Image (cartoon, helix red, strand yellow):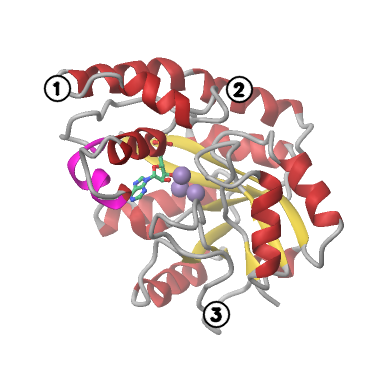
Amino acid sequence: MIFDLHSHSTASDGVLSPQDLVIRAAQQGVDVLALTDHDEMRGLDEAARAADGLAIELVTGVEISVSWAGRTVHVVGLKVDPASPALVDGLAVNRSGRRERALRMAASLAAVGIPGAMEGALRLAENEELISRTHFARFLVGKGYVKDVKTVFKKFLVRGKPGYVSHQWAGLAEAVAWIRLAGGMAVLAHPGRYDMGKEKQSLLMAEFKDVGGVGLEVVTGSHTREQVPIYAAHAERFGFFASVGSDFHSPGEGGRELGRLMPLPDNCRPIWEAW
Ligand code: AMP
Ligand code: MN
Ligand code: MN
Ligand code: MN
């Protein structure tokens, strides 16, 4: 069985519609796919309808942006009820700050001689409530300022670089509570990607566990082969179920393809065993 429990559609910063994403996942041999758009669940209905006619199971999901200790971390909710008022309302609050944040990002880019970024990013965002850094990155590539999206996140849009602005997202306990109230399981996304020392990382995982988090992404498109056993050991130490997801966004931007993932190490308890 191939599980891919982290992916994006045009409801956030992916480039495929929810339907096309599900079709592509099925073509890639994925048996169980979670759609986990950033701070948004509007793609889930379309994805579920697409999965109905195919040999693939759709898991409802979301990826919540969280501010923790002055940093941004991501919490994936799996098996959430998309009609849960607590989750729906919480995500709406998280989304509501994005437009104003985007305006500040555009102003920061304008200050280094890059005009029109707000309009440019907005044109690339199918969901105008969900303007993300990825849309700005695609704008910068499209205009020829940077050669590809990966390079954008080295020269722009990250702390200390043009286009970066700080922003306040949901709190960690808050985001986990929304997921739990929606009947879902909270998973700490791509732990190896956060720019923090080992001690801080342990604090994050301990606090996540404390507030009701149950899973850790061990295999993700963001982890190297070497990071997988490291996070498998963390999952074992903290008693987290292990999750697996490509974090697929687009066929052509250099990220991981749907379903192309390493197997979980033997010391892991796969999160689907808890379903
Ligand atoms: P936002 O939620 O608006 O801050 O945008 C975050 C998104 O930017 C992530 O979900 C990724 O899709 C993208 N992103 C962040 N860092 C990188 C990177 N180094 N390479 C490619 N995409 C990135
Ligand atoms: Mn993204
Ligand atoms: Mn993420
Ligand atoms: Mn993601």
In the rendered view, tell whether residue 186 sits above or below residue 10.
below
Give the residue type that dot 2 points to. Ala
Q: Residues within 10 Å of mark 3 (few under 14, many from 20)?
A: few
Give the residue type that dot 3 points to. Pro
* Residue at figure coordinates x 34%, y 77% from the top left: 226
Q: Quadrant of residue 169?
A: top left
Tag 1 residue: 113
Can the viewer see residue 183? Answer: no
Residue 214 as seen in the image, left or right of residue 22 = left
Q: Residues within 10 Å of mark 2 (few under 14, many from 20)?
A: few
Q: Quadrant of residue 223?
A: bottom left
Q: Nearer the viewer, residue 24 or 130?
A: 24
Residue 271 as seen in the image, left or right of residue 65 = right
N-terminal of the pair, mark 2 or mark 3, is 2
Tag 2 residue: 92
Spot occupied by residue 220 in the image (x, y as percentages of width and height): 47, 64
Q: Is residue 108 magenta?
A: no
Distance in Å between CA atoms under marks 2 and 1 = 33 Å
Q: Which residues are magenta?
A: 150-158
Residue 106 as seen in the image, left or right of residue 47 = left
N-terminal of the pair, mark 2 or mark 1, is 2
